[in-house]
Image (cartoon, rainbow, N blue to C red):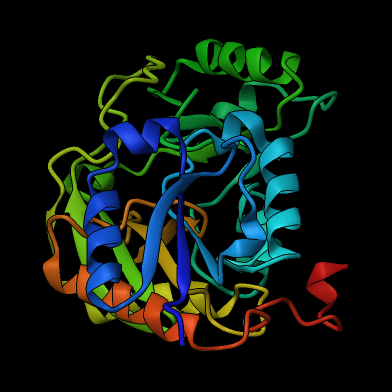
Amino acid sequence: MSAARIAVVTSDAGVKYDVDLPLIVDALHTQGLAAQAVAWDADDVAWDRFDLAVIRSTWDYAERLDEFLAWADATARVTGLWNPAPVVRWNSDKHYLLELAERDVSVVPTQFIEPGGRFSEGDFDQADGVVVKPAVSAGARDTARYEPGRHADAARHARILLDQGRTVMIQPYLRLVEEGERALVFFGDTFSHAIRKGPVLTTPGVIDNFRDAHPGAAPYRPTEAEIQTALAALDAVPSAAAPLFTRVDLALNETRDPVVMELELIEPNLFLASTPHGLVRFVEAVAAESRTTPAQGLARPSDDRWR
């Protein structure tokens, strides 16, 4: 029997800067798998020659979302895609936070303003200020926080995004994020490892699309409450099976309870270069999936959340 062929899906930027990428490919080789890194938008790739395509560092997907989602749908028709195309589509727009809240998952309170919608400066009135961001973005791009009283500045940011045809998110700024954001990584429904990193939005009123998305990332032992909150978010993913990989980003609210900031199911940094046991677990999960049918994990046809 020939070795399973695995595409570790990346992008031009991922090929250059994803430190996990060569580690993943090499580790898959040690498992007897024929793995290679492939950019999702590379010309003339026959995706049907792969037994499995695992999305890793498609870092430009948010800027080319329609094209990327079309690629995911097409690829899923000819090979096993992880995470599955319906999950990728659901997770690509942060409206999913509303669904998590409806399923009693603790999330950062979020208001969405759709293009053409109305808002006032009062929508930006929060005790500790607000965060303004687009509903489709990655790596905190086009995102900024605003101090209390800077309503006009926050509203101006929102108007710029709306004029671009983008949906705007308004969230209260959680001061305790300055004690560190938590990122919990799961393979399947099993917790693997976590990191804590410093705050990203360090300078109020500044949009910096070149900021470090994971400043000071270091290994972290999550509390039981943090693990349970992350598991609740994972359980709310509209899929028949647990995703191959998940990263749940948490912060503490004013009562020091963990809340979900983001649920990362497309191309999250899994911090494998700094977490050797995490790399082993990830590769074991991919190897196990390569031995199963590609249809595993696709959305339930009868699931109302896909309608």
Q: Nearer the viewer, residue 114 or 19?
A: 19
Q: Nearer the viewer, residue 267 or 34?
A: 34
Residue 224: percent from left, percent from top: 25, 82
Q: Residue at x 52, y 74 (%)?
A: 243
Q: Is residue 25 above or below residue 276?
A: above
The total number of labels drawn is 0
Q: Nearer the viewer, residue 195 or 35?
A: 35
In this rendering, position of residue 81 left or right of residue 210: right
Q: Is residue 192 above or below residue 256?
A: below
Q: Residue at x 27, y 69 (%)?
A: 29
Residue 164: percent from left, percent from top: 72, 16
Q: Nearer the viewer, residue 259 or 160?
A: 160
Q: Residue furthest front?
A: 1
Q: Residue at x 63, y 67 (%)?
A: 84
In this rendering, position of residue 268 left or right of residue 142: left
Q: Is residue 141 above or below residue 45?
A: above
Q: Is residue 162 above or below residue 10?
A: above
